[in-house]
Image (spheres, coloured by chain):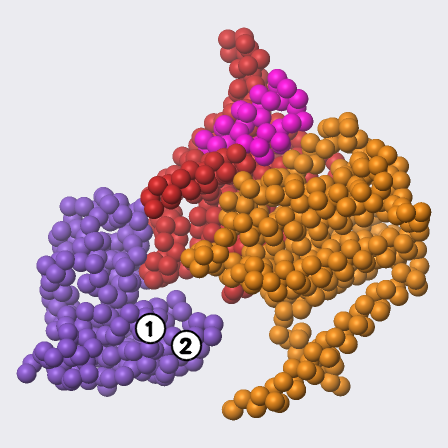
Amino acid sequence: MTPPPARAQRGIRRRLLTRLHAAIAVVIVVTLALPAVLPASALSTYILLELTAIVTVGVSLLMGCAGQVSLGQGAFYACGAYTAALVALHGLPTPLGLVAAPVVAALLAVTIGVPVLTLRGHHLAFATLAMQLICLSLVGRMSSMGGDIGLQGIPRLSVASFELGEDRDYAYLAWGALALVVVATRNVIRSRPGRALRALASSEVAAESLGVPVGRYKLAVFALAGGFAGLAGGVYAFYMGYVAPASFPLLLSFEYIVMTVVGGLGTISGALVGPAVVTLVVQALNRIATLQGMPSYAPTVLSYAAYSALLVASILFLPDGLVGNKRVRRLLLRLEND
Amino acid sequence: MSAFFSYLVGGVALGSGFALIGSGLVMVHCVTRVVNLSQGMYAVVAGLSAATFFGMGAPHGVAELAAIGVAAGVGFLTGLVAMAGRATTPQSSLIITFGLAIFAYAAESLLWGDQPRSFPGLPGAIEVADVRIQKQSLLVIASTAVIFAMLHLFLERTYVGKKLRACSSNPYAARVVGIDVKRMGLLAFGLGGFLGGVAGVLLGPLRPISFDSDLTLVIDGFAAAILGGLARPLMALLGGLLLGVAESMVAGYAKASYQTEVALVLMLAIMVGQRARLATIHAEAS
Amino acid sequence: MNAILEVKDLVVRYDAATALDRVSLTVGRGEMVALIGPNGAGKSTLVDALSGIVRPASGHISVRGRFAHVPEGRQLFPDLTVDDNLLLGACRSGDRDPSWIYALLPDLAGIRRRRADSLSGGQQQMVAVGRALMARPEVLAIDELSLGLAPIVVAALSDRLASLHRTEGLAVLLIEQNARLALDLCSRAYVLEAGRIVSEGPSAQLARSAAVANAYLGGGVALGT
C-alpha cells in the first residue's frame, strides 16, 4: 500500500489539528461554565475533582514519562496545604501562602528525592509510601502544626481587595491552577529535556549511555510533580478553611494512582479523563451506598472496593488507560464521524 | 534490668512475626519479581479468622490451622489476580497488589467490622531470673524457629523447593528446562499467604488485630526483608528480629506510638545505605 | 521425510522489529544439522520459539519427539549445585537419576556438589549439556557451544556429542557462529542472516560455496577443495 502523497498528508494533519483544537475549545467552555450552573453539593465535588486533576497531571508525568512510581504523593498535597495555612494564620498576605505552597512542596520533594530517587522500582515505591506516613505522623505530633486536630480558621484568600468568599470563586481559582499546570506540563513534554524524559521511561540504562543526566532529570520531574501537588494543596487549604492529618490519608495517594492508571500514563488528557471518570463512578457508588437500608460503613467500604476494582481492572484490561487504548480511540473516532 | 530483658524477649517475639511476613515477601519476590504489598493482609485475615473460629467454639489448634489455611488460600487468590494477563510487568503487579491490599481493607471491615479483635493464646507466663516472660512469646519464638527450619529443608531438599529456587535463580533457564513458571509463582504466593497466616495466628494473642493493621504489618515485613535485599529468607529473619527488638525498646523506653516510625526510618536507612554501597562498588569497578 | 523437527514459515516479531521472517527448516531423526549465521541474525530467537519461550506471530512449528535446549551462554542456575542443576533438567522427562550423565561426562562427577557459578566455562558448558540431556531428548538444540571456550575443551565436548549421536541416535540442531566447527560436525546446514534463511544444503557443498567461505570461513580458503 503506497502512502498518501505529502500534500494529502498535510491536509489530513490539518484536519485532525482543527478537530483537536475544536475539542479543546469545547472542553474549556464547558468546564468554565459548569461552576455557574452546578448545585452546591456538586460544585464541591467539582472543585475537589479539579484539585485532584492537578495532582494527577504530576503523577502521570512522573509515572508515564519518568517511569517512577510514587505511592506517597499525598504528602506533597498536604505540605502545600499546611504551608498555605501556616502563612495565612501568621498574618501574612494570603496570596503569599498560595505562592509558597508549591515552592515549599517542591523543596520537600527535592530534599526527599535526593536519597530516595537513587532507589529503583519497588524500593522507590515503598520509600515514597514510607515518606508520606512519616510526614503525616510528624505533623500530627507537632503542636505548632496543630497536632492531630490540625489548623482551623484559615482565612479566605484575598487578592488586593477582592476576597474569594464563594465556592464558585474557588472553582475558578482551581481551574486557573489546572490550566497553568497543563500548559507547564505540555511545555515540559515538548522541550528537549522532556523528550529525553520519554527515553528515560523506556530504559534508564539506554538513556544514561546517551549522555542524559538521568539523576538530575528524575529529581526535576519529582520536584515538579511535588510542586503541582503543593499548588493544589494550597488552594485546598483556602477553600476548606482547615487542614488536619486525617485529611491526607494514604488512600488519597492511592486515589491518584488509580486515576492516573485509568486515564492513561504520560498523557495530559489521560490525567484529566482519569480523575473525571473515577470521581463520577465513586460519586455514583456513594449515592447507592447512602440509600436507605445500607449500613453506615457502606460508603467507605464501597469507595475502597471501587478504587481497587477500577485499578486492578484497568491494569489488566486497559493497560494504556482510557486515553491510550486503541479500541477506545477507534470508538471515539467512529462516534466523531457519525 | 528485668524490664530490659522483658522488652528484649517481647521484641524477639514481635520480630519473629515480622520475619515470617518478611520471608513471605522474599519468597514471592524471588520467584516472581513482584513485591507483594498485600502481604500484611494474610496475617490480618488469619488473625481475624482465628478470632471468629474461636468464637464459634473451635478448639485450640483447629482454629489456628483453619485460619492459616484461609490465609494460604487468600494468598493463592491474590497471586492469581496479581499475575493475570500476559503482559503484566512486575511494576504493574506491584500496583495491583497495592490495590488488592486496599480492597482487603474494605472486605475486612465488611466481614469483621472496625473493632480490633484478639483471641486467647497460650495462657500464663513463666519467671526466669526475675524476668516475667509470657508463654505466648515463647511459643511465637519456638514456632518461628521451627517454621524457618522447615522452610529451609523444603527449599534445599525437595524437588518442588528446588524448582522454586530455580525460578528465583535464573527465570529464563527455568523456562528452558520446562518449569511452569506461572504455577511456581502461584505456589510462592500461596506460601506467602501461609507464612503470613502463621504470623497472624501467632501474634494475634499478643497484639489485637483489626482491618487497619494490614499496612503496618506489611511495612514491618518489608523493613525486615529489605535487609537481605528481598532475596534471602534468612536475612529476613535477622532483619525481623532487629526490627522487633528496636520497636519493643522504643515502645518500652520512649513512646509506644513511635513504633511504626521506627520501622519506616530503619527501612529507609537500610535501603538508601544499600544503594549507596552498591553505587560505590560500581564506581570503584569502573 | 521423517522429520523430528519441522519449522514452516515462522515469523517472530518483537514489537515493531521482525526477528524471524518466514523461516523454514527441518531436522530428520538422528540427523545433525547446523544453523550458522552472524550475531543478531535471530538464531537464538528461533530456538526460543522451539522451546516455547517466545510466541511466533505466524507460522508452524512441529516437534515430534522430546526436545531439549542448551541455551546460549549456558544459563545455569548459579547458586545451585551441579547435581541440582542436572536434577532440574529432568523436569520434562521425570527421570531424575543423573548417574548416566556422570558416566557420560566423568569430569562432572568430581564437582557434583559445587555451586554452578564457581565452575570454569568448560565445566559450565558440560553441566548445561548434561542438564539438557537429563530430559532424555530425541532432538537437542545447542546454542553457541563454543562461545568463550578454549579449542581443546570444545573438541572434547564435540567428541562427546558425536558419540551420543552415534550411540543414542540423538538428533542435534547446532547453532554456531563458528561455522567451521558446525560444518565439520553436521551433515547439513542452514545459513540464517537478518531473520531469513539465505542458503541451505549439505555441509560440504556449503563449505565450498564462495559466499559462505567468504563470510564465515575466513574467506578464500574453502573446505574440501
Viewer-nearest residue: B44 or C154? C154
Q: Earlier in the sequence, mark 1 or mark 2?
A: 2
Residue A239 location in percent, x, y?
86, 47
What's the chain of the residue with tag 2?
C
- Amino acid type at mark 1: Gly
What numbered label is drawn on residue B112? none
Q: Is residue A70 above or below residue A9?
A: above
Q: Provide the residue span drawn in magenta.
A: B237-266
Chain that is coloured purple in the picture: C
Q: Colour of chain B?
A: red
Q: Secondary structure at mark 2?
A: strand
Residue C59, picture quadrant:
bottom left
What numbered label is drawn on residue C18? 2
Tell me the residue at 70%/83% (across/down): A15
What numbered label is drawn on residue C42? 1
Residue B177, picture quadrant:
bottom left
How would you rate the neighbour count of disc 1 (Cα within 10 Å): few for under 14, some for 14-19, many for 20 or more?
many
Quadrant that contains the C terminus of chain A: bottom right
- Amino acid type at mark 2: Thr
Q: Are marks 1 and 2 on the same chain?
A: yes
Q: Colour of chain A?
A: orange
Tell me the residue at 67%/74% (across/down): A328
Viewer-nearest residue: A96 or B63? A96
Viewer-nearest residue: B151 or A175? A175
Q: Is residue B125 above or below residue B107?
A: above
Q: Does residue A35 appear to the left or right of A282 in the view shown?
A: right
Q: Is residue B244 located in the magenta-colored stretch of the structure?
A: yes
**Residue sitting at the far left:** C225
Q: Is residue A190 visible?
A: yes
